[in-house]
Image (cartoon, helix red, strand yellow):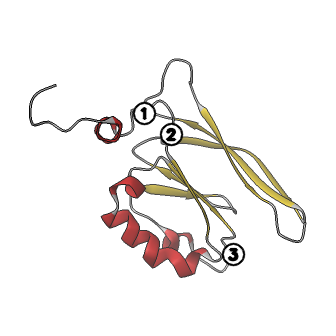
Amino acid sequence: RKRGKRAGALVKLRDRGFRTALPSIHLANLRSLPNKMDELLFLNRINKDFSKCAALYFTETWLSESIPDNGLHISGFQLGGGLCFYINEGWCSDVTTLKKMCSPNLEALFINCKPFYSPREFSSFILVNVYVPPDA
């Protein structure tokens, strides 16, 4: 390494961007996504780790048919699912829904992502978002 250059695992990880072996994931229980959109947009602008995250998982979004999808847009991410996945467009654009499960005791959403870059061992990633209500 050259003199005066920063070193360490975090520096190397940040330099690699989306070329990490495993995707970075952010999970949050929001309790109403529309109320948190301003905060999420702010985090996306100022926090590099948040904006470069491969997938955002949200539970308790309280989404309904009356809320338009364009009001829930985060720059650089695609929205999907009732539980709610945001998949970073810089990491993956080939996303398919594998299965949706919704019952009084469990909500689950399975998606398949084929990222632009992945190690040979992983041709795609199956991401799962699960929510178990407190009264289940």
Label 3 close to label 2 by CB (< 8 Å): no
Would you name the residue on which mark 3 appears? 62
Query: What's the residue at 35%, 61% (across, down)?
Result: 47
Q: Earlier in the sequence, mark 3 or mark 2?
A: 2
Query: What's the residue at 29%, 40% (across, down)?
Result: 11
- Which residue in the rendered view is the most extreme toward the top? 120
In what element is the residue under mark 1?
A: loop
Label 1 close to label 2 by CB (< 8 Å): yes
- Provide residue 123's location: percent of width, then percent of height: 56, 24
Amino acid type of disc 2? Pro
- Quadrant in which the N terminus appears: top left
Residue nearest the viewer, comparing 13 with 121: 13
- Provide residue 79's location: percent of width, then percent of height: 55, 59
Residue 23 got which mark? 2
Query: What's the residue at 42%, 57% (across, down)?
Result: 50
Q: Pointer 2: residues within 10 angstroms few (<14), some, or many (20+)?
A: some
Amino acid type of disc 3? Trp
Amino acid type of disc 1? Thr
- Which residue in the rendered view is the most extreme toward the left? 3
From the image, state whether disc 3 or disc 2 is nearer to you.
2
Residue 20 got which mark? 1
Judged left or right of residue 71, residue 12 is left
